[in-house]
Image (tube, rainbow, N blue to C red):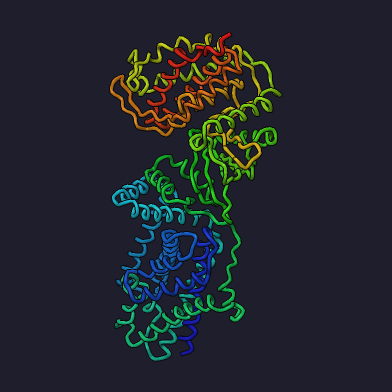
Amino acid sequence: MFFVILAIVVFFVGHILKMLRWELFVQIYEQPVRHRLLTSISVGHFVNHIVPMRVGELIRAMIASTRSKNNFPLMLATVIVDRFLDVIVVGLAFIFFFGVKIGGGQSWEYSIAIYASAIIAGGIAFFYFSKESRLPKLCIFVIGRIFNTSIRNVIYTFAWSLISCFKDLIGNVNRTKLILLTVATWFCYFCSYFLLSRGLQVLGYYVSFSALFTHVYSPASVIDSGWGLYDNSQIGAASFYLLVFTLTPTIVMLLASVALVLFPHNYFPLILRTIGRNSYKGQFVKVIPFANTETKMLFLERYFAAEDRGYCEAYIKANRDIAIVKDYSGGSHATTLLIEKDQNIRCFRKYAFCDSASKLRLQADWLREQHGILPLPEILSCRSDENLFSYDMPFESDAVNFFDAVHCYDSQTCWTLLQRVLNDLNQNLYQPNLRPFSNQLLKKYIDDKCIKNIETIKKHPIINNLLKYDRLLINGRSYRNLQYFEAILTQENLQRVFSSDYCSKIHGDLTIENIIFAPNRDSRYYLIDPNHINVHDSPMLDYAKLLQSLHLGYEFLIRQTDCSINGNTITFPIMRSWSYERLYQKYKSFLFQNFDINRIQSIYYHEIIHYLRLLPYKLEKFPNQATIFFTTFIQLLDDVEQETFVIPQRYAA
């Protein structure tokens, strides 16, 4: 009886070590709660003894996910990875024992074949998942599309969690601890079965270690419920002792976990206090860093559709320590997110990769340099890794994007704020840094931003097809096509138009959405997302950026994808609001009050070039918006030629 009791104790120690090994996976994503892990393992083992097909593993994951920061699919993924390691160990044990003649026969050969197949299949899955290969992702994508959104969410979340666990097994798990705990766990299990077989032999039951091992871990026994183990001629009357051996540690673990919850830990022996202690102090990652289901599903569908693997991988790498509340990314190569850090601290994070990372670093430098000169956000922290740069800005709960403010407040309030922005920029940024422009840089600006972009868009199939026509019928009105306007977009004409420009430090991207209305600030606003590195850094570019927003409604255009094309007839909804129109008329009057006709003409031509700079990017990244932006560009050219430079009578000399 002594050997049986000792076997139970060693088996119990093996379960504790197994719990500590599982903890290595859980602690990547959150602070593990050991008594909950104990409960889930003990209940899972107990269910496996009642229900076949290892349903207890589902129960184990379900209990572990209760009151957890992470959901059931993630916990189930950690259980699968944990169990896959057990399959490897048991398969290797069958091969080793068979090789040293501890066990043999047809049943052993069958078990070895099944375990070897499982290990190979799991190894292939591990390789393809960890490498994020295209084929398995597309298979998961197709399977998910069969079901409704709720089921699809579960499928994609589980698949992503499993992929993440496989990858974290390589990159984030302490491999030394993992190997030591795996070896120690199975050393205890093997010793316990050896001690149990010796104990049964002392009690008069001839049950060898190999027979006991085969009986418990053969593929048929693994699939069957635990009760099937006790109705077997190989074990016979000794089944009662096997039942006691198996269930006693499970019951003790369950009672210990309940006691650890109900009573202060000081009441327990040192070993239980150690088991119940949550000692991990590391940093956790978010397996899916999204705070709402809609945003998460958009990302997962993009990921499993195998679209832009590099972006998806980098997106998660940059944001695994946060929860993403909302994606505010616009039309640039940088990503802007509203995020939530630990202790529910919210802030904005902006990041970019490769060449765009260098530009973002310069943007952060500009915000620091001009802080105190202009109302700007504070840079809370920066992160600079290989090919990645990001910075965080504070979230101000009262602040709203000026686009939203324009449609929430009266036009006079919005115009007063916009005047303040323009006056602050002129007095604090433009005037102190005035300098004449460089003819050489101006020529380069016209070549790079205008001439080359025209050639690029003319080669695109969508635009090339429209250029076959002399005129385009846009929303019922006839316009002359691009070839007519190319005469005014030459190097010579643009140098003449821009001859009245002056240069200075500028914001560089002064669109409506880069002005933040902050009523609790003394300035009542602040500016974000500068793009101050320009070949020709004239303040006229800033004034033209506001025209880009207000004149034809850029912020509405980027939200528009519905466009009908029939020959030279293009139709799309006009979404520009009356609030924009009223603000545009006030802004237009401001320009005529403050600038002569030559500089007004320069500002409007810079608006043309702003749209030209947008078009190649839109054609590449958003081809469904390409026609809308091109036809809007044609409307802008016509408007500039026909109306813009007729000076209102009240401003005439």
Quadrant where the C terminus is found in the figure: top right
Q: Quadrant of residue 350?
A: top right
Please give the name of the residue rendered at 35% of the width and 46% of the height, measured from the top-left corner: 138
Please give the name of the residue rendered at 38% of the width and 66% of the height, measured from the top-left corner: 58
Q: Quadrant of residue 284?
A: bottom right
**Where 413 falls versus 596 (above or below)?**
below
**In the rendering, at what x and y percent does residue 127 appear?**
42, 52
Q: Is residue 545 visible?
A: yes
- In this rendered view, identify the residue nearer to me: 67 or 131: 67
**Where 360 falls versus 550 (above or below)?**
below
- In this rendered view, identify the residue nearer to me: 524 or 120: 524
Please give the name of the residue rendered at 53% of the width and 70% of the height, measured from the top-left corner: 34
Q: Is residue 554 left or right of residue 215?
A: right
Please give the name of the residue rendered at 61% of the width and 30% of the height, measured from the top-left corner: 421
Q: Is residue 615 left or right of residue 280?
A: left
**In the rendering, at what x and y percent does residue 619 appear?**
41, 27
- In this rendered view, identify the residue nearer to me: 29 or 137: 29
Q: Is residue 92 visible?
A: no
Q: Is residue 559 left or right of residue 602?
A: left
**In the rendering, at what x and y percent does residue 434 appear?**
69, 20
**In the rendering, at what x and y percent does residue 501 appear?**
61, 15
Counting every numbered tag in the picture gives 0
